[in-house]
Image (cartoon, coloured by chain):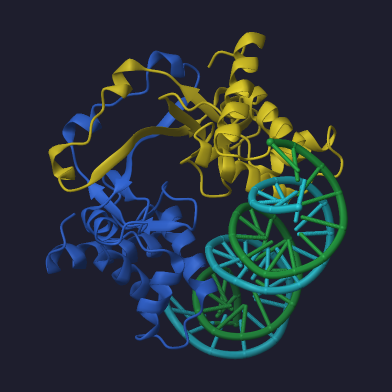
Chain colours: A blue, B yellow, C green, D cyan
Amino acid sequence: MDRSPAAITARVEDLVARCRARGMPVTPQRLAIFRALLAAQDHPSAEMLYQRVRTELPTLSVATVYKVLETFTDLGVAREVPVLNDCRRFDANVARHHHMVCTTCKQVTDLYDVALDEVKPPPAARGFRAHEVSVQILGTCASCARAVRATPP
Amino acid sequence: MDRSPAAITARVEDLVARCRARGMPVTPQRLAIFRALLAAQDHPSAEMLYQRVRTELPTLSVATVYKVLETFTDLGVAREVPVLNDCRRFDANVARHHHMVCTTCKQVTDLYDVALDEVKPPPAARGFRAHEVSVQILGTCASCARAVRATPP
DNA sequence: ATATATGCAAAGCTTTTGCTGAAGA
DNA sequence: TCTTCAGCAAAAGCTTTGCATATAT
């Protein structure tokens, strides 16, 4: 995902435009949480975003983070990533991509691959209306693999 | 997955053998929960299994279901399916396959497709030790699609 | 001025944990 | 007999909800 200052500005302006289009207020909470989500590379949970934005907005509450993330997915400026069962994870990257998930440290890494993008619902899926094909590679990331070798169980 | 009586028997015997091999008791709870999981086509949660087995073992507790499912995954006779964030889902089908997930009714359907099996970790995944590649097709199942058309939002 | 959002607290769910009695091997 | 398990209850997370206040338009 493009993380240049210009791209960030464009994404924030897009959020503002979408809020205005629906007559929804542009609040400091929405802006700060969206900026934090744009800056994040780790598909943060609501709690993680709360911790990061709290330094900027000390009165922020976790409930607000959840509500704002819900709003973002409704507006189409962010999405929930369908990985890991322990807590909800979010991403401001709405372009097509896939994920590598470390089952040890729960880190989620984006994966761009045209071959994976070619994956289509097979004939067996008849009657099912596919909205999204998501490839999820589960395994152990490089640093966790090293840690395990250093301290065997 | 083969659900013939002979196959069911073989799977149960396999469970018994693996328990014995590790010196673990074969309890009525383990047998009943495993049979329920073998019979299930819907990737049940712990709560769903609890409701189904309860009729057979009225004294069963949900905590036991969780512990037993943990045991099953350790033994390699069942697995947790990496789909949906609302609750943990389990499957006695340990063969390679993928999933279609209805985001409306949360139904999870198995998907067998050799083309999807060909999906491999791309070069970008260097250093990452892939244990499993799981393709997840998110969308709306046939019956939910009908329901939406009948009662538009 | 009005509609909407925020913050707080409480409740709701799913899942885990600790312990005691029960039951397989 | 001896180890492991089942059941219970309590606790721990994550997430949602209801309501009064604050705020963006």
Q: Residue at the spot x=43%, y=54% of the render?
A: A73
Q: Give the quarter of the figure containing the C terminus of chain B.
A: top right
Q: Residue at x 22, y 36 (%)?
A: B121
Residue B103 appears anywhere in the view: no
Residue A64, compared with residue A111, is above or below; it is below
Residue B84: x and y, percent?
Answer: 51, 44
Indicate the quadrant where residue B31 lies.
Answer: top right
Q: Quick one: A114 or B145, which is closer to the camera?
A: A114
Looking at the picture, tell me which residue is in the foreground, A7 or B63. Answer: B63
Q: Position of residue B82 (x, y in %)?
A: 46, 41
Residue drawn 73% across the image and 31% down it: B32
Horizontally, is B96 left or right of A1 in the view? Answer: right
Question: For residue A125, which quarter of the picture?
Answer: top left
Q: Is A76 or D6 nearer to us in this picture? A: D6
**Residue A47 in picture, x, y percent from top left:** 45, 70
Residue at the image position 65 percent from the left and 26 percent from the top: B40
Total number of numbered discs in the rendering: 0
